[in-house]
Amino acid sequence: MRLALAFCALLGTACVTVNVTRFADEREPEEDVLLPLVPGESDLTQCLEILGAPVVVEELDDGAVLGWGWRRFQNMSVNVSVPVSSDANASVQYGRGGDGVEGIVLFFDADWGLVEVKRGHLQEILRSSRSRPNLIEED
């Protein structure tokens, strides 16, 4: 019981700070904007007319990958500081956050025909699209 009272007394003199941050850059296109983009029918010109300039362009062995992105960030942190003497404070901080560039990635064949449309975090999609070199086995 005394420990609980001492803890409550410490909290009464503690400083608690809560910080929540959230922002977004660029605007995510509406879902219906992508409807005219049909793999096997659409080409690079149509995609650029609808989405504008891409933020990522990568060449593949048999085509290319173009990506359009927007950034979202959200972070929350709590900081508790408790005086333990006249000259010192004890503090605990907890933070949780995440950020990433979400977007749309379009895959094109060698003739600039649209092959596939993917939506999600750009780095994850681009990482999965990159091929690794094949080992050459000698006879």
Image (cartoon, rainbow, N blue to C red):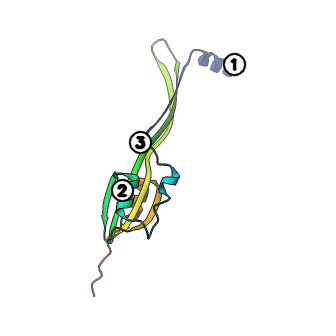
Q: Which residue is mark 3?
A: 26
Query: In terms of depth relative to the viewer, which is nearer, 92 or 107?
Result: 107
Comes first in the chain, label 2 or label 3: 3
Badge number at residue 122: none
Rounded to the nearest angstrom, the CA distance separating label 3 from label 1 is 55 Å
Q: Position of residue 97 (x, y in %)?
A: 49, 39
Comes first in the chain, label 1 or label 2: 1
Depth check, mark 2 against mark 3: the one in front is: 2
Q: Is residue 45 left or right of residue 27?
A: left
The residue under the point 45% across, 13% down is 87
Q: Quadrant of residue 105?
A: bottom left
Q: Position of residue 18 (x, y in %)?
A: 53, 26
Kind of residue at disc 1: Arg
Residue 61 higher or lower than 121, as above or below: below
Badge number at residue 48: 2
The residue under the point 46% across, 46% down is 28
Rounded to the nearest angstrom, the CA distance separating label 1 from label 2 is 70 Å
